[in-house]
Image (cartoon, rainbow, N blue to C red):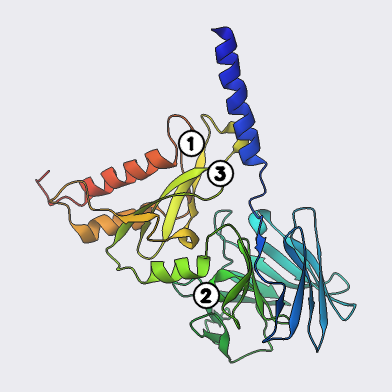
């Protein structure tokens, strides 16, 4: 009996080790060249490191986490990059390591910055439902930059190109020299409406479009293997969120946090959910779910007793009761 218990513990430990040490940013090369843009792309470990076009050659150097740390154009160092966890851009430096721009986040759960410091000024960002940067304002709330995109993410209006911002369409990191969008999930070319590299089968551009086509009162439950972990999360108000372990060293009896999963909404894996009780108000139910899936630190995460699936069930039940017409069940 002891041998069986020991074997089970060993298998669980190995599985957890493999899960938390996997390469979640692994991408797959889709094309190596583009005849329409007359450009060729070179990859190392499925990461873009070189672009050759008739006008220029761009080279990227990567750190041990496969994140860009510098960019050269025709062998001239243009800028360098400093990162936070989870591939979040903290700062852009010039060739002498002076800070050109610093990006600010409200908390560790937010994937998109709310502001940028450049020189002595602070600029604030306004996004649309596609997570695309739409407007930049200064501290006096004066509009200093407006961006518009076509349906594939190509910039069709930038009324202030002298104020470059690294955040672009669908929340991707926009490289003004290559005109490419860099995501954690891969590299996207809006001019071609194609992914150069992409993680597994997740097309986050199409996913966000599907999400933004849903109705405000719609609630969806999604179940998908986003890496090797079978994850469950909810979507409402054109946003998705699900519970993840906050401390990987305490995967059992630890804490968790709600993470934005909007990039992974797809009707092939998401099913519309109704309130548990027929007398629940659907509008109130949807608003409650939307509030519950906002980025926040939850009180408990335990892989065995309270995980993402339990959180989904708890939110549906809680919001269904909250949305009940008074005096009914």
At numbered mark 1, what does the secondary structure look like: helix, strand or loop?
Answer: loop
Residues at marks 3 and 1, CA–CA distance in whole angstroms: 18 Å
Q: Which residue is mark 2?
A: 132
In the image, taking residue 178 as reference, residue 74 lies left or right, namely right
Label located before the other in sequence (1 or 2): 2
In the image, taking residue 35 as reference, residue 54 lies left or right, namely right
Q: Is residue 144 visible?
A: no
Residue at image coords 75%, 53%: 65
173 lies above or below 21: below
Residue 13, quarter of the rendered image: top right
Q: Pick whichever, 259 or 4, lies toward us.
A: 4
Q: Which residue is mark 3?
A: 228
Q: Which residue is mark 1?
A: 301
Residue at image coords 66%, 76%: 180
Q: Position of residue 294 (x, y in %)?
A: 43, 55
In the image, taking residue 289 as reference, residue 127 lies left or right, namely right
Q: Pick whichever, 226 or 107, lies toward us.
A: 226
Residues at marks 2 and 3, CA–CA distance in whole angstroms: 28 Å
Q: CB of mark 1 within 8 Å of CB of mark 2?
A: no
Which of discs 2 and 3 lies nearer the camera? The answer is 3
Residue at image coords 59%, 10%: 3
54 lies above or below 130: below
At numbered mark 3, what does the secondary structure look like: helix, strand or loop?
Answer: loop
Q: Check disc 2: other Cα within 10 Å, few if <14, some if 14-19, many if 20+.
A: many
Residues at marks 1 and 2, CA–CA distance in whole angstroms: 31 Å
């Amino acid at each position: 009996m002891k041998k069986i218990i020991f074997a089970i513990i060993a298998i669980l430990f190995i599985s957890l080790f493999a899960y938390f040490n996997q390469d979640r940013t692994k991408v797959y090369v889709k094309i190596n060249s583009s005849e329409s843009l007359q450009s060729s792309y070179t990859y190392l470990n499925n990461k873009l490191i070189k672009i050759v076009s008739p006008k220029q050659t761009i080279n990227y150097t990567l750190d041990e986490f496969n994140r860009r740390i510098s960019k050269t154009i025709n062998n001239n160092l243009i800028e360098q990059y400093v990162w936070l966890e989870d591939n979040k851009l903290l700062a852009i430096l010039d060739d002498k390591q002076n800070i050109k721009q610093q990006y600010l986040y409200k908390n560790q759960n937010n994937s998109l910055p709310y502001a940028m410091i450049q020189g002595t000024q602070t600029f604030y960002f306004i996004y649309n439902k596609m997570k695309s940067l739409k407007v930049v304002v200064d501290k006096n709330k004066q509009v200093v930059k407006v961006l518009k995109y076509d349906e594939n993410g190509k910039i069709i209006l930038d009324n202030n190109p002298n104020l470059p911002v690294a955040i672009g369409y669908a929340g991707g990191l926009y490289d003004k020299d290559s005109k490419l969008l860099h995501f954690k999930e891969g590299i996207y070319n809006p001019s071609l409406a194609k992914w150069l590299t992409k993680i597994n089968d997740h097309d986050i551009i199409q996913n966000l479009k599907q999400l933004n086509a849903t109705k405000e009162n719609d609630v969806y439950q999604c179940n998908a293997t986003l890496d090797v972990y079978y994850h469950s999360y909810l979507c409402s108000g054109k946003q998705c969120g699900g519970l993840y372990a906050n401390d990987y060293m305490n995967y059992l009896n630890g804490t968790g946090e709600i993470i934005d999963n909007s990039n992974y909404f797809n009707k092939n894996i998401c099913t519309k959910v109704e309130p548990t009780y027929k007398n629940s108000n659907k509008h109130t139910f949807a608003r409650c779910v939307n509030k519950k899936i906002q980025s926040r630190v939850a009180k408990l995460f335990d892989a065995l007793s309270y995980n993402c699936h339990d959180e989904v069930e708890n939110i549906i039940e809680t919001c269904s009761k909250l949305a009940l017409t008074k005096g009914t069940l």
